[in-house]
Image: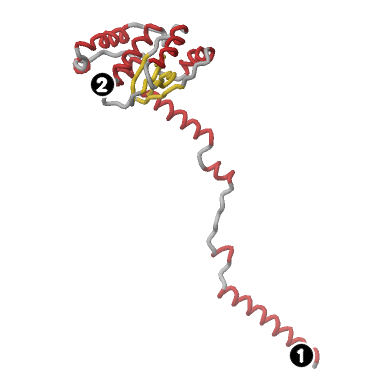
Amino acid sequence: MIRAFLLLTLIFTVLGFSFGKILDGILLPNSSEDQPTVSVETPEETKATGESDETTEEKTSIEVAVNDENAIYIMQLGVFETYDNLLTLAGDLQKLGYNYGVTRTDGKYSVFSHISGTKESLESVEQALKSQNLTYFIKRLEIEGGDLRWDYFLQAVKQNPFEMTSEFIQTFTDDEMHIFGYYMTLSNASFETLANERQKMLLEIYQWLTQ
């Protein structure tokens, strides 16, 4: 009698457990199969699937190089309230054998000594100015297209060959024909980037452009 009771109890227990598992399968979805999967990228994975730092640096270098095609560099040495105040600096530059130019903006005089198509080409000038304890900074000027006068100046500074059109020639007045002569010389003659003859012409043209 007791044995039969225990056997029945065991049977009902097994059936109840099995029935509970069946209900779980029907009512509750399997989390590993039915739940959406969320993936989290580690920093290493992100770097592997995205652009590397080296690629970014290469792109930046390329962009700078492209922009520099339209840029010139001007060695500027000071800004003065009156013309008399810049004469001492002018004397120091002449001792170094440098030409200088002066522009006037908002009533102040700016002094500059060299104009070049690349910043690197001005390194020897920097060293000379430092040896004389002269204050300077290199001004980067990007030339926007559309103005013939500046377009030709850019080509002259970059030492690119060019031929002047009649439209450009007509921009000169009788008093400015010496500037026209400088352009003619720069388009045909070969000068070292920092040669005094070349810098003298570029400085005077720049003054003409900025007056």
Return the residue nearer the eye: 101 or 14.
Answer: 101
Q: What x and y, as percent, mark residue 116?
A: 40, 16
- Which residue corresponds to mark 1? 5
Residue drawn at point x = 59 percent, y = 63 percent: 32
User: Which quadrant of the rendered structure holds the C terminus?
Assistant: top left
| On screen, residue 146 above or below 200 | below
Query: Which residue in the structure is indicated by mark 2?
Result: 148
Mark number displayed over residue 150 = none
Q: Position of residue 88 (x, y in %)?
A: 44, 12
Q: Which of 79 and 84 lies nearest the eye of the viewer?
A: 84
Q: Tell me residue 201's x, y (percent).
A: 34, 10
Residue at (53%, 37%) from the top-left corner?
52
Q: Residue at x 54, y 64 (%)?
A: 35
Place of residue 19 in the rendered image (x, y in percent of width and height, measured from the top left): 63, 80
Q: Is residue 20 above or below residue 124?
A: below
What kind of residue is marked 2?
Answer: Leu
Q: Report crowding for label 2: few under 14, some 14 to 19, many 20 or more residues within 10 A (C-alpha).
A: some
Which residue type carries mark 1? Phe
Q: Quadrant of the N terminus?
A: bottom right
Numbered-mark total: 2
Considering only order in the chain, which callout, 1 or 2, is on the residue closer to the N terminus? 1
Which callout, 2 or 1, points to the residue nearer the camera?
2
Q: Are marks 2 and 1 in contact (CB under 8 Å)?
A: no
Classify residue 210 as left or right of residue 4.
Answer: left
Judging from the image, what secondary structure is the residue with disc 1 in? helix
How far apart marks 2 and 1 lie (CA) works out to 111 Å
Q: Residue 86 vs residue 51: left or right?
A: left
* Nearest to the observer: residue 9 or residue 73: 73
Picture quarter containing residue 48? top right
Q: Secondary structure at mark 2?
A: helix
